[in-house]
Amino acid sequence: MPRRTTATSRRASIATQRDAAGPGEPMRAFSRSLPMALLRAREAVMRHFRPTLRRHGLTEQQWRILRALSSVDDVEVTELARMAYLLGPSLSRILRDLEARGLVARRAVATDLRRGTVSITAKGRNLIATVAPYSESVYARVADRYGAAELARLQAMLADFEAALATLPDPDGASEADGEDGSDG
Amino acid sequence: MPRRTTATSRRASIATQRDAAGPGEPMRAFSRSLPMALLRAREAVMRHFRPTLRRHGLTEQQWRILRALSSVDDVEVTELARMAYLLGPSLSRILRDLEARGLVARRAVATDLRRGTVSITAKGRNLIATVAPYSESVYARVADRYGAAELARLQAMLADFEAALATLPDPDGASEADGEDGSDG
DNA sequence: CTGAAATAATTAACATGTTAAGTTATGGAG
DNA sequence: CTCCATAACTTAACATGTTAATTATTTCAG
């Protein structure tokens, strides 16, 4: 390991194998796990979007927020988080930045001062109008390469999958602990 | 917006609509974009894994690394990054931590001091053995709820999708810039 | 009306994602 | 052999993911 000492023996067994699944491990083949497949598929698409967004000073999440805002007059922060699929803390930080850049505007709700509403500004709409064509272009290329029909089917399956898992009980985080690895302290 | 001033007029139009798709925006319905669907599907699964991992002091990425290492004797860092689907910088940081916790061990490759190999320790294997049952249990519940056959089909489609997109030209980051928002500087 | 519980949003703290830059070691041209 | 391009990691810097703690308001039991 470069940047350290102790150059010991050698080995260089390259290990081109991916999932050896040793004789004592009955676990699923690691590289084929569903979360991994979903992650890889998503990255396969996103890597085509990021460069364009980046050239316009936007991250994927900022783009999601602007897109969500462009479809409504104004929304409360909590609802926006749901629409853009972001957690509250992430949204809070990003809105602070987008507001400072003049892409969104915030207002308090007079009837409940805990709440705030967010809306996209003209500058924000202009940015969307500038980037949208590239975004559409990428999407078209993806649909063309994989097949529009297949793509629609894939999306339908993903929606079904999400709906099916939504019926599972909440994982919470308290029910199956045993503490044996000592990394909790 | 709480934590700020300027309580102006009111509005409270709640906006239960999701994708209004205003009369001037021809873009795809935002909430149904493929990247979003993949993100939601992945989160639907991961939210059931995270609590258990967390109870054992592991993050999702650390778990991927340990699982990958458990399938081989030892691997070079670059190959491990590919196996665990992590970028180099993320892997560097995580390995530093896992090594400090005694879950993995590193060695330099004598024939090329730039390279380093990583292997899982006995302590690391014990941790995997402890967590694996919970992981398998979650996976079984997911498969049961969505259907094992459907799940297999979904994974196959995801693999096909990734393969199809791999044939697209690299996005690079220089080919369709026009610079209109001044963030390219 | 008062104070505890609940709600909306933000802040804090730590881990990873992502791109750029830096470091050490190889390898090859001349 | 020397110098430079490359390669393999690591470090740096900034943005987001994730969970916990805080702050400001509102709600509601009593």
Image (cartoon, coloured by chain):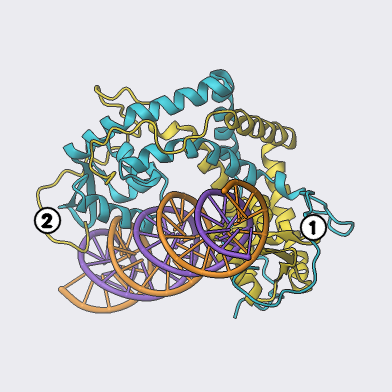
Chain colours: A cyan, B yellow, C orange, D purple
Kind of residue at disc 1: Val
Gap between marks 2 and 1 measured at Cα: 61 Å
Label 1 is found on which chain of the structure? B
**Considering only vertical position in the picture, is A69 above or below C26?**
above
- The quarter holding residue A41 reads top right
Q: Can the viewer see residue A39?
A: yes
Q: Quadrant of the C terminus of chain A?
A: bottom right
Q: Secondary structure at mark 2?
A: loop
Does residue B25 appear left or right of residue A32 in this picture? left
Q: Is residue A29 above or below residue D8?
A: above
Give coordinates of residue B56: x percent, y percent. Answer: 65, 69
Label 1 crowding class (10 Å Cα cut-off): few <14, some 14-19, many 20+?
some
Q: Position of residue A179 (x, y in %)?
A: 68, 75
Sequence-earlier tag: 2 or 1: 2
Q: Is residue A71 visible?
A: no
> Could you say which disc has been placed on residue B7 in the image?
2
Q: Are marks 2 and 1 on the same chain?
A: yes
User: Image point 73% across, 50% down: which residue?
Assistant: A30
Left or right: A181 in relation to A146: right
| Image position, residue A169 (x, y; %) | 60, 51
Q: Nearer the viewer, residue B8 or C25?
A: C25
Residue B168 falls in image quadrant = top right
Residue corresponding to mark 1: B72
Read off the chain for label 2. Answer: B
The residue under label 2 is which amino acid type? Ala
